[in-house]
Image (cartoon, helix red, strand yellow):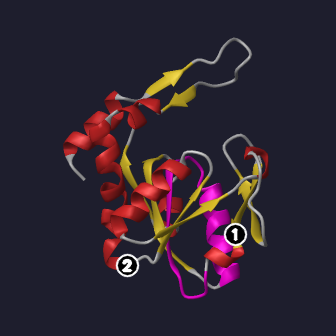
């Protein structure tokens, strides 16, 4: 990944105060999607650390993963499988394979599902996301892979701020770090 891409990711990022009732600031990554150079470089940068592992499919969780996942899949020349959350709208038709995450940074356990027919035994899965804070969703996606006989080769995220030991164990790679 270029130093210029890392610099632009930081420049285009904002912390937003959602108001007096909020307990924390909210990340605003919308600038990443507006910048055509960043958008063009994200997919190749996300897959670069895992190209040698020869992923056969990219999996990414709703919502921003639905933007990043196809960019990464296109850069690899493989398909994309979205991971859905029950509260994010209508679930796809057909059999779904579910897993529940460990507690995330807000203490929530998130349910994730993929369409069972799109993740196969023997698939080598690259998980992609915008931000990995606790790796709870990464773990749930790895659990889905295991239940379907697929092998996660690792996770690539734009920002990673989970404990380094967790990142090492789950093979999580970050493109950049952002100011706190």
Residue sitting nearer the eye, 145 or 171: 145
The quarter of the picture where residue 71 lies is bottom left
Does the stretch in magenta take in 80? no
Residue furthest to the top in view is 20
According to the picture, the residue beneath numbered tag 2 turns out to be 53
Residue sitting nearer the eye, 99 or 172: 99
Q: Earlier in the sequence, mark 2 or mark 1?
A: 2
Residue drawn where x is 42% and y is 64% of the image: 73
Does the stretch in magenta take in 134? yes
According to the picture, the residue beneath numbered tag 1 turns out to be 115
Tag 1's secondary structure? Answer: strand
Where 30 sits versus 47, above or below? above
Residue sitting nearer the eye, 39 or 104: 39
Question: What residue range appears in magenta?
Answer: 120-148
Which mark is on residue 82? none
Residue furthest to the bottom in view is 122
- Along the horizontal axis of the image, is 112 left or right of 138? right
Residue drawn where x is 39% and y is 36% of the image: 32
Rendering coords of residue 74 (x, y %)? 38, 63
Where 84 sits versus 22, above or below? below
Residue drawn where x is 55% and y is 51% of the image: 66
Q: Is residue 75 visible?
A: yes
Rendering coords of residue 106 (x, y %)? 71, 40
The quarter of the picture where residue 82 lies is bottom right
Residue furthest to the front in view is 93
Residue drawn where x is 67% and y is 72% of the image: 143
- Front disc: 2 or 1: 1
Tag 2's secondary structure? Answer: helix
Q: Residues within 10 Å of mark 2 (few under 14, many from 20)?
A: some
Residue sitting nearer the eye, 160 or 168: 160
């Amino acid at each position: 990944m270029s130093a210029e891409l890392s610099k632009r990711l930081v420049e285009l990022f904002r912390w937003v105060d959602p108001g007096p009732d909020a307990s924390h600031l909210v990340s605003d990554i919308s600038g990443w999607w507006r910048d055509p150079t960043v958008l063009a470089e994200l997919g190749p940068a996300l897959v670069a650390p895992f190209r040698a592992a020869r992923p056969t499919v990219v999996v990414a969780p709703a919502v921003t993963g639905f933007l990043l996942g196809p960019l990464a899949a296109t850069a690899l020349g493989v398909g994309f499988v979205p991971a859905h959350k029950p509260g994010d709208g209508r679930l796809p038709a057909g059999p779904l394979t579910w897993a529940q995450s460990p507690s995330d940074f807000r203490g929530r356990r998130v349910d994730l599902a993929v369409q069972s027919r799109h993740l196969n035994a023997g698939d080598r899965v690259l998980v992609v996301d915008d931000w990995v804070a606790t790796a709870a969703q990464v773990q749930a996606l790895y659990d889905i892979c295991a239940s379907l006989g697929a092998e996660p080769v690792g996770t690539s995220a734009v920002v990673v701020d989970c404990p380094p030991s967790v990142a090492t164990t789950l093979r999580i790679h970050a493109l950049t770090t952002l100011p706190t």
